[in-house]
């Protein structure tokens, strides 16, 4: 880990996400790596204290929660699991794909997945999601309010996706309410060790290695990992599978978590992204998109 860290620390390729204004001004030099094993050994190096926004990595855990509530079959029927081969926020994918939602890890499919979460009102649904993420991490996580506000003020694209989904009857609660909850879930803060712990819960068949709680039903874990393999790095997923081969998920906050089933998880944080929206350094300098 130290070798990889030293080798890539000075890499300055890529650039911070700037379509969310807050993310544009995050210190792009930050770089942290953490490994958490299924028996909760922790190895880390670099920036391990900074809480970055989880962004799209949240999609994995909302998918897990939806499956806890509805079962894998119903989630599959309502969302599907096909690669889009397009950018994570693609509008044309919604129009052209037979399922419209694509899969739970692109924005449209993720917003639809968030809309599946049951609750008496928006606040109830959001609290349930935050609590579920916290249980996956083994400690209380919180919303980064500045990220939420910045993203909520600039998320017209996601609102448009939600209305398109409504046209195809592929969103299952109020579209804008669902986008708002989705925007909150993307604004949850995690440091790189917390993210690796969330990953280790998946590596450990859904059981949190710190608290011992079975957060995700073991039977649902293979569906989550296969979806991550297929679409975790969006239209960079094929190259990642070719070169790295681990189920993983990226977020435009600069995080990537990769799962080694039965052994543990590796999380990396570094804000500069490639053109697919995946952290450059977290891919260890590989160019995974052909
Ligand atoms: N919140 C971001 C968005 O909706 C998440 C995207 C990502 O991390 N790729 O655009």
Image (spheres, rainbow, N blue to C red):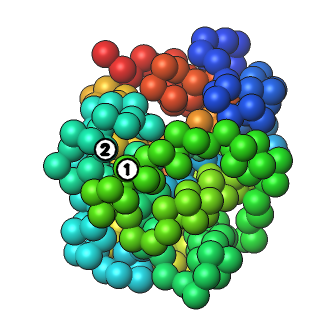
Q: With respect to residue 278, does 137 lie above or below?
A: below
- The structure residue drawn at horizontal position 77% and vertical position 22%, both measured from the top left corner, is 29
Inspect this view and state whether residue 87 appears. yes
Q: With respect to residue 166, does 233 lie above or below?
A: above
Pinpoint residue 155: horizontal percent, then vertical percent: 61, 43
Inspect this view and state whether residue 195 appears. no
Residues under labels 1 and 2: Cα distance? 7 Å
On the rendered image, what quadrant is the C terminus found in? Answer: top left
SS type, badge 2: helix
Q: Residues within 10 Å of mark 1 (few under 14, many from 20)?
A: many
Q: Residue furthest bottom?
A: 120
Pinpoint residue 228: horizontal percent, then vertical percent: 36, 49
In which image quadrant can residue 243 be found?
A: top left
SS type, badge 1: helix
| Residue hosting label 2 | 94
Left of 72 or right of it: where is 217?
right
- The structure residue drawn at horizontal position 45% and vertical position 53%, both measured from the top left corner, is 162
Q: Nearer the viewer, residue 238 or 122?
A: 122
In the image, ligand 1 is in what quadrant? top right
Label number found at residue 141: none
- The structure residue drawn at horizontal position 56% and vertical position 29%, both measured from the top left corner, is 279
Dot 1 or dot 2: first in sequence order is 2
Q: With respect to residue 43, does 241 lie above or below?
A: above
Judged by depth in the image, the label closer to the viewer, 1 or 2, is: 1
Pinpoint residue 63: horizontal percent, then vertical percent: 42, 65
| Residue hosting label 1 | 164
On the rendered image, what quadrant is the N terminus found in? Answer: top right
Left of 152 or right of it: where is 198?
left
């Amino acid at each position: 880990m130290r070798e990889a860290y030293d080798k890539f620390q000075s890499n300055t390729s890529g650039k911070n996400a700037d379509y969310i204004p807050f993310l544009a001004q995050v210190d792009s030099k930050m770089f942290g790596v953490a490994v958490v094993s299924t028996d909760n050994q922790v190895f880390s190096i670099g920036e391990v204290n900074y809480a970055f926004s989880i962004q799209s990595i949240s999609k994995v855990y909302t998918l897990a929660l939806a499956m806890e509530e509805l079962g894998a079959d119903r989630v599959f029927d309502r969302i599907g699991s096909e690669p889009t081969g397009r950018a994570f926020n693609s509008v044309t994918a919604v129009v052209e794909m037979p399922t419209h939602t694509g899969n739970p890890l692109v924005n449209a499919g993720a917003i639809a997945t968030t809309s599946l979460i049951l609750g008496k009102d928006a606040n109830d649904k959001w609290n349930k999601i935050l609590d579920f993420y916290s249980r996956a991490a083994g400690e209380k996580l919180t919303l980064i309010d500045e990220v939420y506000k910045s993203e909520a003020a600039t998320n017209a694209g996601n609102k448009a996706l939600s209305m398109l989904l409504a046209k195809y009857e592929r969103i299952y609660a109020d579209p804008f309410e669902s986008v708002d909850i989705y925007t909150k879930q993307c604004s949850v803060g995690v440091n790189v060790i917390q993210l690796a712990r969330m990953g280790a819960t998946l590596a450990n068949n859904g059981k949190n290695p710190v608290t011992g709680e079975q957060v995700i039903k073991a039977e649902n874990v293979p569906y989550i990992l296969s979806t991550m393999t297929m679409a975790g790095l969006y239209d960079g997923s094929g190259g990642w599978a070719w070169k790295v081969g681990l189920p993983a998920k990226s977020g435009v906050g600069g995080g990537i978590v990769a799962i080694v089933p039965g052994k543990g998880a590796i999380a990396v944080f570094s804000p500069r992204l490639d053109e697919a929206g995946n952290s450059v350094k977290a891919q260890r300098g590989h160019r995974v998109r052909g």
